[in-house]
Image: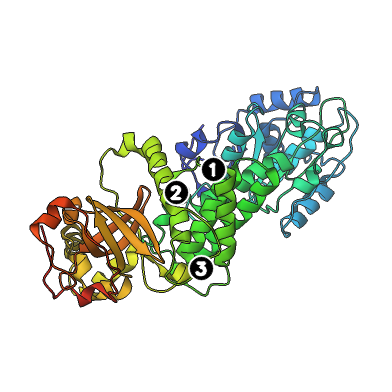
């Protein structure tokens, strides 16, 4: 036997792509019928004839049977492999389903032993050049694992080369997927739980001794594949935060947002624990999309996003992830002189957020510096949230003539030194926040409320008094950056610094850059 290029799979364009051992190892539960199966092998005629004889004695068909019959037919040495009743109808129905957006069920009735499995395998063999065909050989106890491997098969190859999967489930495997009948246990029927999924077709005959069935996209495995495939495309929370760094455009982000909306709806129907996480990713996808196109028709109204987040907050009171609380800060941070209609105690949420962070990440991240990706800017609603990439792009535009490495070094230096907060272009973009320092603790003062925040540099809060700063958000909580004591407002004595408490007056500072030329205290 000789293998020149290895195993190949068809793509949606009708071409073949070659896959390596890594792909083959990732789909061990499936007997994949590669598009070039047996083509590059020197088949021993004695072995082939024995397989043929065994088949006619009642043994299950092997791929070798179909291959040998195909070769012999092309050489005019034998008659073609007999196409069983229903073959043409099944092929036509599969091709018709590929044109639509919904999966469906087809029943092909056969007497026991009349060749339902052979028919199904014949269809797989004849469609191996246009679809990705496989037989499930592993145990059916873990549907999630099976779905994951089906997705690996569907997405194998480079971007844009995925193709529909035609999967055969054999004999008693069917019952494992069917589970208890709905008429007894209630709930929606299998057909009602089917999800739109044009890239997966599942066929199988029923248990031995019963009528044979061939079904497409059975809902239990289809649901799992719908969810996993969409999550794979949609990107999870950390990846979403970095989408703008990777240059994702409106089209990419609109698709991602749509996918998370569909996943969220799917999780709602299941009434499980997955809706909370799906909702978080959907909300973040909206935030990220709004940074590229604030008027995108894919954006969900802010009031609905807030209602969704509040519902999950109340349902899982005090038991949320740091990422969840980050969204709470982004959506519910108060705006001056504007009521948002929700009663969210942010000080309490921030304490819960810090506890959640300590339980989730502290032992892994220890005292590592957390780089904020979102800052509070001018404007309202989602438009007031500024992604860090926008600030980086300002510096790129200012240094277009510099080499890439030099630009990167310059940007890093501006962040690490704190020079970024003195840049006029950044000051035009971000919103200065009035605040106060008491006993080395920083509080943001907004809309009549005081909200405790962390100082990016603790050395900047060595005395009590009114301050002004920019606000950024991390998964540990809100952080004050570029803290300034406006010296033109009030002069503090040495005793003020020691005793801590100073009578506070709200500052009306339109912009930090208006005070940067005044006398400031730096340490």
56 or 288, nearer to the observer: 288
Assess whether mark 1 and mark 3 are in contact (beta carbons under 8 angstroms).
Answer: no
Q: Label 1: which residue? A: 317
Assess whether mark 2 and mark 3 are in contact (beta carbons under 8 angstroms).
Answer: no
325 or 410, nearer to the observer: 325
Residue 521, above or below 497: below
Among numbered discs 1 and 2, the one appearing first in the sequence: 1
Q: CA distance from mark 3 to mark 1?
A: 23 Å
Q: Is residue 430 visible?
A: yes
Residue 264: percent from the left, percent from the top? 61, 52
Residue 508: percent from the left, percent from the top? 29, 74
Instruction: Answer with left or right where residue 410 lies relative to residue 47.
Output: left
Question: To which quarter of the image does residue 502 belong?
Answer: bottom left
- Please tell me which residue is depicted at 28% across the width and 67% down the height of the picture: 505
- Please tell me which residue is depicted at 64% across the width and 34% down the height of the picture: 143
Using a 10 Å C-alpha cutoff, classify the residue at mark 1 as few (fewer than 14 neighbours), some (14 to 19) or many (20 or more): few
Q: Secondary structure at mark 3?
A: loop
Q: Label 3: which residue? A: 339
- Please tell me which residue is depicted at 40% across the width and 65% down the height of the picture: 448
Among numbered discs 3 and 2, the one appearing first in the sequence: 3
Q: Mark 3 vs mark 1: give the one in front.
A: 3
Q: Is residue 240 visible?
A: no
Q: Label 2: which residue? A: 349
Question: To which quarter of the image does residue 516 belong?
Answer: bottom left
Q: Secondary structure at mark 2?
A: helix
Among numbered discs 3 and 1, the one appearing first in the sequence: 1
Instruction: Answer with left or right where residue 463 lies relative to residue 237.
Output: left
Q: Secondary structure at mark 1?
A: loop
Using a 10 Å C-alpha cutoff, classify the residue at mark 3 as few (fewer than 14 neighbours), some (14 to 19) or many (20 or more): few
Instruction: Answer with left or right where residue 41 lies relative to residue 123.
Output: left
Residue 345: percent from the left, percent from the top? 47, 53
């Amino acid at each position: 036997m000789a293998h020149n290029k290895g195993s190949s799979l068809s793509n949606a364009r009708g071409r073949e792509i070659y896959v390596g051992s890594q792909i083959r190892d990732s789909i061990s539960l499936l007997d994949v019928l590669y598009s070039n199966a047996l083509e590059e092998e020197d088949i021993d005629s004695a072995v082939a004839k024995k397989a043929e004889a065994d088949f006619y004695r009642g043994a299950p068909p092997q791929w070798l049977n179909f291959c040998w019959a195909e070769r012999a037919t092309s050489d005019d040495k034998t008659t073609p492999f007999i196409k069983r009743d229903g073959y043409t109808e099944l092929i036509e129905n599969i091709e018709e389903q590929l044109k639509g957006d919904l999966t469906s069920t087809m029943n092909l009735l056969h007497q026991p032993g009349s060749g339902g499995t052979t028919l199904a395998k014949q269809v797989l063999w004849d469609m191996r050049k246009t679809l990705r065909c496989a037989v499930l050989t592993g145990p059916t106890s873990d549907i999630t694992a099976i779905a994951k491997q089906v997705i690996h098969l569907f997405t194998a190859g480079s971007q844009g080369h995925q193709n529909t999967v035609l999967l055969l489930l054999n004999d008693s495997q069917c019952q494992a997927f069917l589970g208890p009948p709905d008429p007894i246990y209630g709930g929606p029927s299998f057909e009602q739980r089917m999800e739109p999924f044009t890239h997966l077709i599942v066929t199988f005959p029923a248990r031995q001794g019963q009528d044979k069935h061939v079904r497409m996209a059975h809902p239990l495995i289809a649901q799992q594949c719908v969810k996993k495939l969409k999550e794979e495309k949609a990107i999870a929370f950390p990846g979403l935060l970095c989408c703008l760094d990777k240059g994702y455009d409106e089209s990419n982000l609109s698709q991602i947002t749509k996918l998370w909306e569909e996943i969220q709806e799917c999780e709602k129907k299941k009434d499980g624990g997955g809706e909370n996480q799906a909702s978080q990713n959907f909300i973040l996808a909206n935030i990220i999309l709004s940074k590229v196109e604030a008027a995108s028709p894919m954006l969900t109204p802010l009031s609905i996003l807030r209602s969704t987040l509040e519902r999950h907050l109340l349902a899982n009171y005090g038991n949320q992830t740091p990422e969840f609380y980050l969204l709470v800060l982004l959506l519910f941070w108060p705006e001056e002189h504007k009521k948002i209609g929700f009663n969210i105690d942010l000080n309490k949420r921030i304490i819960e957020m810090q506890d959640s962070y300590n339980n989730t990440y502290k032992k892994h991240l220890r005292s590592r510096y957390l780089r904020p990706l979102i800052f509070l800017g001018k404007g309202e609603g989602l438009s007031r949230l500024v992604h860090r990439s926008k600030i980086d792009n300002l510096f790129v535009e200012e240094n277009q003539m510099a080499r890439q490495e030099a630009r990167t070094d310059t940007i890093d230096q501006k962040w690490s030194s704190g020079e970024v907060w003195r840049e006029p272009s950044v000051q035009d973009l971000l919103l200065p926040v009035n605040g106060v320092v008491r006993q080395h603790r920083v509080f943001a003062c907004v809309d009549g409320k005081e909200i405790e925040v962390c100082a990016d540099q603790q050395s900047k809060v060595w005395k009590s008094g009114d301050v002004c700063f920019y606000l950024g958000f991390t998964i540990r909580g809100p952080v004050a950056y570029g803290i300034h004591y406006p010296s033109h407002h009030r002069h503090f004595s040495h005793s003020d610094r020691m005793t801590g408490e100073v009578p506070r007056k709200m500052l009306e500072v339109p912009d930090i850059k208006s005070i940067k030329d005044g006398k400031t205290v730096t340490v």
